[in-house]
Amino acid sequence: MAQTVGDFLVDRLHQWGVRILFGYPGDGINGVFGALNRANKKIDFVQARHEEMAAFMASAYAKFTGELGVCIATSGPGATHLITGLYDARLDHVPVLAICGQQSRNALGGHYQQEVDLPSLLKDVAGAFVQQASSPAQVRHLVDRAIRIAVGERRVTAIILPNDLQEMPYEEPPRAHGSVHSGVGFSIPKTVPYESDLQRAASVLNKGKKVAMLVGAGYGWIPGILKVKLGVNELLATIMLNSIAALIIEYLVQFPMRGDRSTTAHSPVIDESAQLLAFLPGSKWGVGFIIAVIAVIVIYIYLWRTKPGYEQRMAGQSTKFALYGGIRSDRAAIRAMLISGALAGLAGAIEVMGVHRRIMTGFSVGLGFDGLTSAILGQIHPIGVFIVAILFSGLKLGAQLGLQLKLDIPRELGGTIIGFIILFVAAGKLYEESIVRVRDWFTRKRGSNLKGESR
């Protein structure tokens, strides 16, 4: 059997690295689906419940993999249903190719059933490239250009194939005037700023000293002032300020500091001289761990070997006792938030310089709650918090790698275990008080019995 246009399309997509299609079949695109059946699963097909869902699937696939997402639909209403999902891809700047069927070429212009002017319909959402094929020899460069533009410019593109054309024998473009020859392959160019701009940016950064810790301390000062002056709960204030800080980082990484137009927004990779060294190749365990150990030692010495540290602990444990002892609890609270903010800034710097090597959207999501959990389980003691943090990280990593990847057990089970641990530890005081009450009751009961016997 001669290779049809549909067969060529499937083979060309495979050459471009496409391994999955999202769509919904129909009469207007049956020629391509027949080719998919004959291709011996070179490309997997995921049938959605609706064409709009297929477009959203292709968009999500491009976002989470960084590869080209491809969706396919029949002519008329099938093609129109793709629009909303394609706009999602366009607005998020991800590469998506839409393949649409069309009525027979002889029927076009005759107001035929389900005939829609698809090039005009798709012109806005796929304005970078949208073309309708009219001959077998034209399909080759339409596919190549659509994919190359989608990947290179991170845009939505579309090609439209009349149903009679899909079943025709494929023809290579002739070696003649008026024909176009194209090939497979594209390399994303590396964009490098001018040397003068890099030097100016480096000079600004080099003038900073302990910037992350100072910014964190300043940001931690805000909930401290709100606590002292207005009586605002510091836990609620820090949670709200965390959301504000996350949105600020989101803006910076999405716009002025964005490194490229990849699916996940991030800054350029920091210079190698500024990266924290790793102890093992391919590992995230490195100098950041040593910095954390030093921070634990410094905080321990501060809290248990210095006068301000003693005041800090007394103000936290008993405000009235601190007041009778002449300790200003308001100053201690602000000092605690300054130190906490500085440590948080240090942790963020370690995460950026030693783990991700760049600033990424959402890189710090959940770290605050992890720290709060470690503090609760560590009984608010630097050494205890350090030990619990190591065990906590092992439990989380084990739940992700051991349970989910190795045993197919949902990693949420690890979070459930951690939740029960927190519950039991936090309820320890309640258990102690209950035991004391029961013991006192038995003591009083026994005392009354002894009095009765003596009478």
Image (cartoon, rainbow, N blue to C red):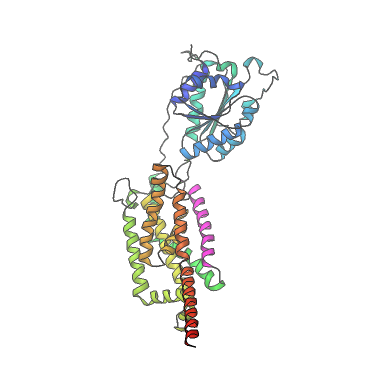
The boundaries of the magenta stretch are 231-260
Percent coordinates x, y for residue 250 in the rendering = 50, 51
Instruction: List the single residue furthest toward the right.
Output: 111
**Picture residue at 33% right of the left edge, 66% below the top:** 297
Residue 47 lies, with reference to residue 200, above or below; the image says above
Image quadrant assignment for residue 92? top right
The answer to whether any part of residue 364 appears in the image is no
Which residue is at the front of the view, 326 or 314? 314
Question: Would residue 139 appear left or right of 190 to someone viewing this image?
Answer: right
Instruction: Give the residue drawn at x 50%, y 24%.
Output: 143
Can you name the residue that lies furthest to the bottom here? 455
What percent of the width, then of the height, locates residue 129? 55, 29
| Residue 232 within the segment the image draws in magenta | yes
As displayed, is residue 411 above or below residue 238?
Answer: above
Q: Within the magenta stretch, is there residue 131?
A: no
263 over 294 or under it: above or below? above
Image x and y of residue 298, in percent: 34, 67
